[in-house]
Amino acid sequence: MSHLMNNYARQAVAFTHGQGCLLFDEQGRRYLDGLAGIAVNTLGHNHPRLVRALGDQIAKLIHVSNLYRVKEQEILADRLAALAGMDEVFFCNSGCEANEAAIKLARLYGHQKGIEHPAIIVMEHAFHGRTLATLSATGNRKVQAGFEPLVPGFVRVPFADLPAIEQVAANNSSVVAVLFEPVQGEGGIHVAGDDFLHGLRRICDDKGWLLMVDEVQCGLGRTGKWFAHQHAGIQADVMTLAKGLGSGVPVGACLTAGPAAGVFKPGNHGSTFGGNPLACVAALTTLAVLEEDRLLDRAVALGERIRAGLRARLAGQAAVLDIRGSGLMIGVELDRPCGPLVAAGLEAGILINVTADQVVRLLPPLVMTDAEADELVDKLSTVLLAFLAG
């Protein structure tokens, strides 16, 4: 009997090692990774350049704390700021911590403007984390249940609904920011259109609100741009990152620009582990490989290949409501709950995920080959058709 706390419904498999997009279990069985540790393993498994960089850094320094300068952190901050067109970077360890920093920053920004109870607009079906504040911002009642009282100060609207936001703007003078995901991952792979992002930027400019973009799952090249909101050509005031930034090494970031830059002062916020040398080297190596191997372009091509393959194989299936996504964020929505597909996928030798009860979610590593993409399509289609046939 394990002493692990029983808060995960784990599948009955343990992996021992991986190579590229492949994983192997204790019996030596091979699996194709279509999930990348939930959009974390950007470079797949055992990437030689990442392994070498981490080994070199471990032999030098792992952690020293933010009581001192961390040169690797400064280099990474400069690189991220240049890619995002932003001014400042705060490093932490995870997506929920990055979003927690954004929420605190928005509240401080509001207080500095004389607003007594600053409020943040958030979206239905959003997922921003599991701390009390980020859980309260999340639009999923199932994960909130049992943890009341939730943190106040959030105004919820339907996803990508400009008229709803305009109505809030006309009636709530306490709003200071909007927090949203350009592509909702946990919510079912819903993509906010360019028109929505342009309209939201306009409203935020008109009202003096911060536009805060949660790129924890959809950022770092997964949709074919460095950051998903860049497809619309807009500039964020606050952007949060984590997951794929360190290719498996925990690292998160909260970036600021324009009116959000300079809001945090010494003592306002911090992190013990955030931005340590090891995490920053992992992130710097990830960014370098993404750029030098042109993996953003690969994300677009692979995403189109997988979606086209699934549409061809699943054509005529009335139970398949939609096949959608952006780059290597892909969702197959069914007309029924489909949780058993996760175990069926494992049996077939593929790692997939089901989110929002009836959406099969694919988040493969960006190093996937064409042949592996075709294998993923073939095995997933076979499993799906068998499931739908009952």
Image (cartoon, rainbow, N blue to C red):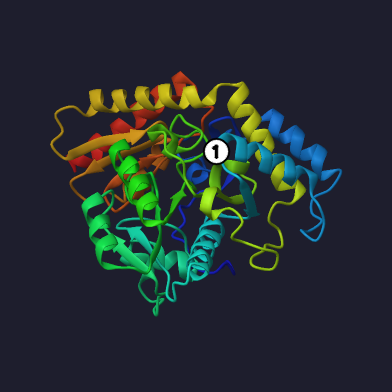
Q: Residue 63 lies in what quarter of the image?
A: bottom right
Most foreground residue, 10 or 99: 99
| Quarter of the picture holding the C terminus | top left
User: Residue at image x 48%, y 22%?
Assistant: 297
Left or right of residue 272, residue 148 in this image: left
The relative height of residue 244 versus residue 169 in the rendered view (above or below) is above
SS state under label 1? helix
User: Seen from this angle, which residue lies furthest bottom?
Assistant: 149
Measured as percent of width and height from the top left, residue 121 is found at 35, 61
User: Residue at image x 33%, y 62%?
Assistant: 140
Measured as percent of width and height from the top left, residue 298 is found at 48, 23
Measured as percent of width and height from the top left, residue 242 is found at 56, 48
What residue is shown with label 1? 84
Q: Residues within 10 Å of mark 1 (few under 14, many from 20)?
A: some
Residue 230 appears in the figure: yes
Left or right of residue 43, residue 236 in this image: left
The relative height of residue 314 versus residue 347 in the rendered view (above or below) is above
Q: Residue 19 lies in what quarter of the image?
A: top right
Residue 350 appears in the figure: no
Measured as percent of width and height from the top left, residue 286 is found at 63, 34
User: Residue at image x 43%, y 70%?
Assistant: 118
Left or right of residue 280, residue 129 in this image: left
